[in-house]
Amino acid sequence: MLKILTTIIITLFIGGMLYGQSAASHLYYSDIIVIPSDSTSNVFYTYKIPLSHLVFEKGSDLFLAQYRISVEIFNTGNDKFIIRSTKEKNIQVPDYSQTISSDIYSEGVLVLNLKPGDYSVMEIFYDYKSAKENKFPLRIIHIDSVTKFEDPVIVSKELLSCNNKQSPVVTNYGGNLPFDENEYSFIFPVKTNNPDSLFLKVIQDKDTIFRGVMDKSFRSSFQPIECGGKILLDFNQDLKNFSIFKADGISKRIKEGSFLIRVSDKSDFSGSKDFKLNCKWINKPRSLRDPEIAINALKFIEKDSVINSLLDVDKEDYQTELDLYWKKIDPTPLTEFNPLMQEYYQRIDYASKNFTTIAGTNGADTDRGKIYIKFGKPSEIDRLSDDHGYIIETWTYNNSQRKFVFIDKKGTGDFSLISG
């Protein structure tokens, strides 16, 4: 098993991550960022739509999609319509694979202006190519002009240049912290008192996984803007409406699931405010979503005795056992996310999707599927017919100097390994 896992690790850090399935709560991710002021507040609705959720039409040399997204605001007391904001976008991509990708997104921002009060928000999404409309009640929002601590905004560590300045990228996954190999920061706007420091606790599963102090800030206003196909957090230091604190080095300590951030401007956390957030594995491999299925899927690299021992616990402990198994072979043990675990199950997903036979054999159980799971994507794939009319497929792995030859004698897509 160690040799097989070593091969996976080498492929992981040479070839990068593979494939994925969309995990949006409905058609797309969306969030609301409220920036209060004394009289009226700016309400920014942000969204992020996987291209796989749009209907594309083949043009002369491009694939085309078009959609309209609207946000309607109602008074919660009497359901009276207040205001609507709408945006249309045309999408053009050159390659079919992009049209079915759950890792490429169309993003945008809609801006509304509201007085203090309670409102309900309705999303309306219309796809022009399919002529289908979907409505989603989003949530109730409370707007208060007198608030000390505003909701944190999650941004990536990378900065993008826009309007001649560098700005952080809003992750824009519906307010979720992405659970992946990247590092993210939390932006905390503080409205009043101009504190010198902001004290912070992060609590998950009743454990305090981080406690610290942020003692650097700057005075500024802020807002999400569209730039270069991304949503950036733009700061305007000419308008000194907030003290802006930035918390780094926390995201990799947080595991998948809900967590709580507690902030205060006092070291004893008096007058603190809690923010309940979620860490979400975006495009989590399907074969990893059920821990019992995920444990059984270890059959490609483990003995039956190991799998049986992992299953020899109460069912509610399967996830814990699975996590402990992968933690022992985690190439990044100081972080919660295990890229080797993700790579393995992404390979299973890919094999299941691409190598399933006409007779119905799961692609992961075929010879090609097993080789793919163990060694990853080949450097080269060659196909030809032999003298008997059988299809022969040869996979070459340049890094490991290995070659595998498969043959389909029945014409059902079930390629048997004959060499390698």
Image: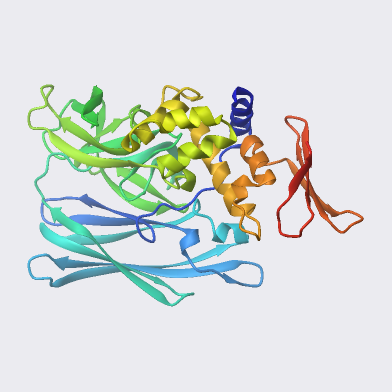
Q: Is residue 180 above or below residue 90?
A: above
Residue found at the very far bottom of the displayed protein: 131
Q: How many marks?
A: 0
- For the N terminus, the quadrant is top right
Give the quarter of the image for residue 110: bottom left
Q: Is residue 317 left or right of residue 75?
A: right
- At a point 13% along the width and 54% down the height, the residue shown is 142
Q: Is residue 12 left or right of residue 32?
A: right
x then y, percent, for residue 361: 62, 53
- At a point 47% along the width and 24% down the height, the residue shown is 332
Give the quarter of the image for residue 128: bottom left
User: In front here: 145 or 163?
Assistant: 145
Q: Is residue 215 visible?
A: no
x then y, percent, for residue 124: 32, 69
Q: Is residue 307 above or below residue 72?
A: above
User: In front here: 346 or 315?
Assistant: 315
x then y, percent, for residue 257: 31, 39
Give the quarter of the image for residue 273: top left
Q: Is residue 26 left or right of residue 308?
A: left
Q: Is residue 385 above or below residue 148?
A: below
x then y, percent, for residue 26: 36, 60
- At a point 11% along the width and 44% down the height, the residue shown is 147
- At a point 55% along the width and 64% down the height, the residue shown is 92
